Image (cartoon, coloured by chain):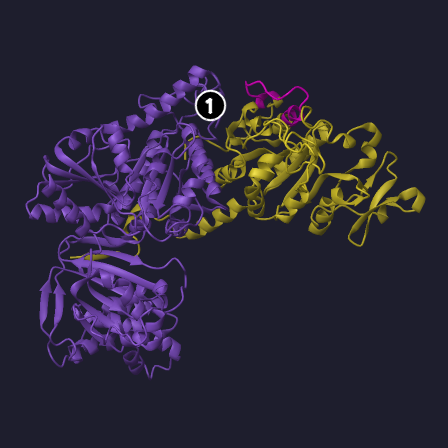
Chain colours: A purple, B yellow
Amino acid sequence: MTDTKKTTRQANVTSKTSVSVLFAGDSGDGMQLTGTQFANTVAVRGSELNTFPNFPSEIRAPAGTIAGVSGFQLQFSSKPVYTPGARFDVMVAMNSAALKANLKDLHRGGIIIAGTEGFDEKNLKLAGYPDGANPLEDGTLDNYIVFPVPVLQFTREALKESGLSSKDVDRCKNMFVLGLLYWLYTLPLEGTIETLQTKFQKNIQLAEANIKAMKAGYFFGDETELFANLGRFDIAPQKQHGTYRRVTGNEACAIALTAASKKAGLELFLGSYPITPATEILQTLAKKKKYGVKTFQAEDEIAGIVSSIGAAYGGALAATNTSGPGLALKTEALGLAVILEVPLVIINVQRGGPSTGLPTKPEQSDLLMAMYGRHGEAPMPVIAARSPVDCFYTTYEAARIAVEHMTPVICLSDGYLALSSEPWLVESPDNLADITPRFQPARKPEDAPYLPYKRDDRLVRSWAIPGTKGLEHRIGGLEKQNETGNVSHDPENHELMTKLRAEKIARIADTIPLQSIDNGPLKGDLLVLGWGSSYGAIKTAVEQALEEGYSVAHAHLRYIHPFPKNLGTILGNYKQVLIPEMNSGQLIHLIRDAFLIAPVGYSKVQGVPFNEMEILAKITDLIKES
Amino acid sequence: MTDNDTTIIASPVLTAKDFASDQEAKWCPGCGDHAILQQLKNVMPELGVAPENVVFVSGIGCSSRLPYYMATYGVHGIHGRALPMATGLKVSRPELSVWVATGDGDALSIGGNHFIHTLRRNPDLNVILFNNEIYGLTKGQYSPTSKIGLRTITSPSGVIDQPFNTAALTIGSGGSFFARAFDRDGKYLRSILKRAALHKGTSLVEIYQNCPIFNNSAFEAFATPDSKADKTIYLEQDKPLVFGKEKNKGIRLDGFTPVVVDLDKEGLSTSDLWIHNEADINKASILARFADVHDKSEEVVPRPFGVFYAEERVTYEDALTEQIRDAQKNGVASLEDLLKGESSYVIK
């Protein structure tokens, strides 16, 4: 980067371990793109990284208002990070609404880079500040380090000879900010330059303008006196060598389904209906046709799952993805999949409920629905992903269980995992577990009759798919006679089949790994038991508590039904068990029910993930109280 | 998928009995469903498809028990959802012959949304819609095709809902094939089932089916020797619309309105009549409305039977297969490619 050596004055560079940054502005300010570019740059350089976008559910909420604020938070670090940061160290606020909406989550003493044009009279009014009040001028931000930067003015100056329309020029202002942040964190511009050149391949003028605006931001950092006291920062990259890619939870789910189909030698079929925040799984898979993936955008949630059941009956690895309202619509079909005993993966990306609830916000409130939300007794495995990368491994495992145990499996993610991203050390195909479908071979006329519901020692029936000679058989949602699968209303038979279906799922516990302790002592004062996306916050909090000398451990459940066989023993090894959940206490019901113990619940039902500080405070309070 | 050869053509010695399962049909004595089942078994050997390559899919209702009685693959699903189940199966396994047995309640009420969307997508399914204008399995409630005024257990003062016109709904939904048949006329039903099977795309066959228990004689006018010839018209491609005991009546179009003419009295020849053309969607739309042409609440034109409309149009599964083939023109991508993705980076 020869250009940037024109430095007039060398600012001090301070080393730091971790930084959490929030890019916030109006929905139209390009903050998602800016954040993504920044994340790509630090990832490719080898930093540990965790990102989380936060945007309104309206596509274009009124400009300048709090409702229209779009944010992208990321934490990058020299050591592993599991959350985007409980609070951010730096906030880019392109307008006053962005500042107002996010100030409470900025560290005291944190840095604010404010685009001053977003703090004019009109914007202040739209953000709801009282007449005459301007936080950049009235001293309300005295506890922070504030850098007011006329971003729009500088962008316009930089691009005054670009020949672009004033609208196009103004839209480059996010690149000015990005360049400034690259300067502040001593990061290279090349990656973004390449991306912009590719993105605007067909409009070189626009590519050049964006690059110029970014460089202008970078040089501004160099040349201004504004940052003289602060200086620059360096977060040394520490990632071990290897090939990485950055994935969101939804992308990871889609990749896992495709990988599982390849590994199992099955075609992947996804029947789906768009729903926030699960839609990216359908979108990603729709682009995987070169892997032979078939996606079917159905007319509704019910057709989404039922088409998948049809495909599963035909021998495909079938899946459907949805969020809470969709899972509710699919429940009758879930029962059908249970009684048909066909493999099916249901990915439920949870969001705040009930009803339409909080479409873009995460919650862990569908656990009991996943467990019990069907008529009749219709047990099925439930497993939950803990991080964006873990969405890959958990979804893959859901597919393995579904195919090898001939059952629908619910795989729980949530809106936080769905959109968050982290670097993934690209997995080798050889490391993926084998998935072995048990297709029933063709039958000759002289062979014994085919029995569709004859089971092996794991109580799993075989997969007899149409097209196989000699296996023609009829099955359906009516209760069936044991082994033959013929319709049966016999009372004893129904009870037997009910027990067989439950026992089949219970026996999956024989094939899944034992529960491990993620961190901390094997016996002690407190076990924090989590599931799902609270992993990062609990992990970070327990690490901190251990450093402070507390006797605390962390276990995180992937398998919720059936539970790992040693879970009861583990729970007995601690004086207290704390279960943090983004619901009013659902796992705690299951744990109490299964083990007759009294864990302490910790609920957060705000559509916002737990942060590590909240969990840490709860841990220390509990241990101090006891 | 398996090493079983799915392309074997059925041996020509197969008979209707080879398509009969070991389960006894549990419909009421005298139910039209028995006749439909028999014609399905009869037509199967004529199609040259091996039983293992045939799948019957159904929802809920009397009609939806049909898969249990066919010695093919069969799956009995949930109420209203046979069409998406069949679509998923067909999209996943295009080489199979997939049939759907459904009823007026299953297809047009609880499954109404799937009905219209399946028709517009046009997967190659053979949909046999048993229309008895009543709910049978739940014991006699009115259905979305029940006539206005019909007194049932849930309409003691008479039905006040306008019934669906299945033909018009099919054509309006972008269906590529509509035919109507009658449970009482087995030979004709069989010919229509064969046409439906041979049509590539979603073939919708509405079968007027008598429910002797809850809606007996709903279609009697089209069956009794006294009225049959005057109340029905059988469609034949490129043939004039002629009907009547003496074959002396016909249909002409007055603008967009079908009118009955008497060839003898009006001195017309058959060449003056409406010539049936299955490929003409406008004419098919008018045929679909014959049942709705009334004068003082009397139907004034005969009820058409046969193939109203047949359009050769790409099927959903073929279009998808084509897109996949196109995406794979440079080879099927590997698991390594998948895991690595397109934006991976190396940390040295």
User: Where, quadrant-wise, is the N terminus of chain B in this rendering?
Assistant: top left
Q: Is residue B202 magenta?
A: no
Query: Is any atom of residue A483 visible in this view?
Result: no
The furthest residue to the bottom: A161
Question: Which of A176/B318 is in front?
Answer: A176
Query: Residue A487 at x, y = what percent?
Result: 50, 21
Q: Is residue B21 magenta?
A: yes
* Residue where numbered disc 1 is placed: A479
Query: Residue B288 at x, y = what percent?
Result: 71, 44
Query: Residue B41 at x, y = what percent?
Result: 62, 25
How packed mark 1 is, by other alpha carbons closer than 10 Å (few <14, some 14-19, many 20 or more), is some
The furthest residue to the front: A131
Q: Look at 25% across and 61% down and name the residue there.
A: A40
Q: Secondary structure at mark 1?
A: loop
The furthest residue to the left: A549
State which region is magenta: B17-39
Horizontally, residue A409 falls left or right of residue B78, namely left
Q: Label 1 is placed on what type of residue?
A: Glu
